[in-house]
Image (tube, helix red, strand yellow):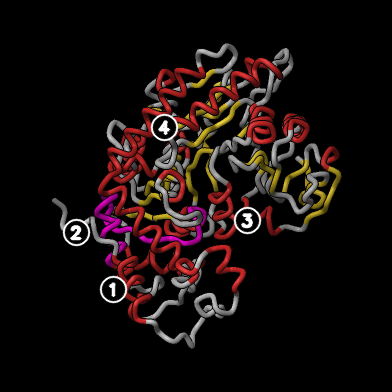
Amino acid sequence: MGRYNQSRAPIYEALREFRQNRIVPFDVPGHKRGRGNPELVSLLGQQCVGIDVNSMKPLDNLCHPVSVIREAEELAAEAFGSAYAFLMVGGTTSSVQSMVLSVCKKGDKIILPRNVHRSVINALVLNGAIPIYVNPDMDSRLGIALGMKLSQVEQAIRENPDAVAVLVNNPTYYGICSDLRSIVKLAHAHGMKVLADEAHGTHFYFGADMPLSAMEAGADMASVSMHKSGGSLTQSSFLLIGPHMNQGFVRQIINLTQTTSASYLLLASLDISRRNLALRGEEEFAKVTALAEYARREINEIEGYYAYTSELINHDSIFDFDRTKLTVNTLGIGLAGIEVYDILRDEYDIQMELGDIANILAYISIGDREREIERLISALVEIRRMYRKDSTGMFTQEYIEPKVAVSPQSAFYAEKESLPIMETKGRICSEFVMCYPPGIPILAPGEEITAEILQYIAYAKEKGCSMTGPEDAGIERLNVLKEMRL
């Protein structure tokens, strides 16, 4: 039995008591418990709007918690097995950026896989740290980037002994895990911190027979998207730290960028969701895994689709696999993943998590039921029958190895010019280009624009991928460094 009572939800309990006190509000927010905005009450309900309140003594303050929020953070730390846990209301983006800003400063080197979420590279734009990319292997059949090989990390450390940290995806968007325990051991032996982006790994902490969590592997910091597989409200997240991080300094880093007006709707949702998973997580995630495994078996009976799972494990670049992820390769029916994604939404009212060049991903979590799985399977059968094409000449690759010329910060703030996208070959990009989701940059600031990348962008646009990043919303032009060619 732990030190804390995991059936408690102190923020939620404080809000419930606050509501009963019928306090007269001469503070913000200005809607005054919804009275000033009846349409908002009509949309969200009085119960919700009534607890959209400001920090005050009985409710504590996220910037410097001393009572109910601090207790909620201590409960979360125990539940996740971390030395401390911070409640984050700026999404896992703010959690990831706080990790990077906590261990790096301008000019410091950080080792990371290039298939990171844009939030990591955004942090490098902010603080001027230098990325040392480990370029992951590709599975050319599936069109996905794999995990970091231990040998690749070892080489990066050998070539950059002055690096201060290593960042690892645990897992990738597609469910692939690196050998995190060995990476931690290696990095720590060289005096480097280890950061884990666990945006897609909340369930690792609560489910049985799951891949290793970052805290269990001995990582120094981990960003956990509680709102993804953990059931809290969108934009709520946890930042976990190990015993060798300075808790007070990390709090100061968080406070550099996180709002001073934290939403109590988000904080309460984190509190309640942590309680739910601490009490029932193992049972809930066993159901999630069973649903995903059932869906995979059924989908793999349909010729042309491939729903992959732990059979990919090679104990290196795919050290482990998250079996809750239902990723389906669609190239065998002659359709890009994004094309199947669009058909599912437009014709079948089924919203997938992502569609890329080669795959679709269904995010199975604690809110799913068998009937929805059946509906997806039936739709995929029909799509194959009605839309199947010849797959000759289809792209497969989700990731192209970049050529880094200058640091992300230098490129982002450099003097630049705007050119038609097809005229940028050989120039240095000063902005991001990506399909979102998954939010892994095709181009990041400071990287050379190649013919292969331009061809990929054109193909992704033609297939209907949601392209984001550049100033030009139409992705017809790109900003490049002025008069700088390789």
Amino acid type shown at disc 3: Gln
Regarding mark 4 in the picture, which secondary structure is present there? Answer: loop
Q: For marks 1 and 4, give the CA distance.
A: 36 Å
Q: CA distance from mark 2 to mark 4?
A: 29 Å
**CA–CA distance between discs 2 and 3?**
43 Å
Query: In the rendered image, which residue does mark 1 sit on?
Result: 67
Q: How many numbered discs?
A: 4
Q: CA distance from mark 3 to mark 1?
A: 39 Å
Mark 1 vs mark 2, CA separation in Å: 15 Å
Q: Earlier in the sequence, mark 2 or mark 4?
A: 2
Sequence-first tag of 3 and 1: 1
* Span shown in magenta: 71-93
Q: Report which residue position mark 4 lands on.
A: 324
Q: Position of residue 28 (x, y in %)?
A: 51, 81
Q: CA distance from mark 3 to mark 4?
A: 36 Å
Determine crowd level at label 3: few under 14, some 14-19, many 20+ residues with C-alpha closer than 10 A. Answer: many
Residue behind mark 2: 4
Give how far across and how far down residue 364 sits, in percent: 45, 35
Q: Mark 3 — residue? A: 409
Residue 432 lies, with reference to residue 379, above or below; the image says below
Q: Which mark is residue 403?
A: none
Secondary structure type for disc 2: loop
Q: Say which label, 3 or 4, has the lower sequence index.
A: 4
Which numbered disc, 3 or 1, marks the residue closer to the eye?
1
Q: Secondary structure at mark 3?
A: helix
- Residue type for callout 2: Tyr
Residue drawn at point x = 29 percent, y = 31 percent: 209
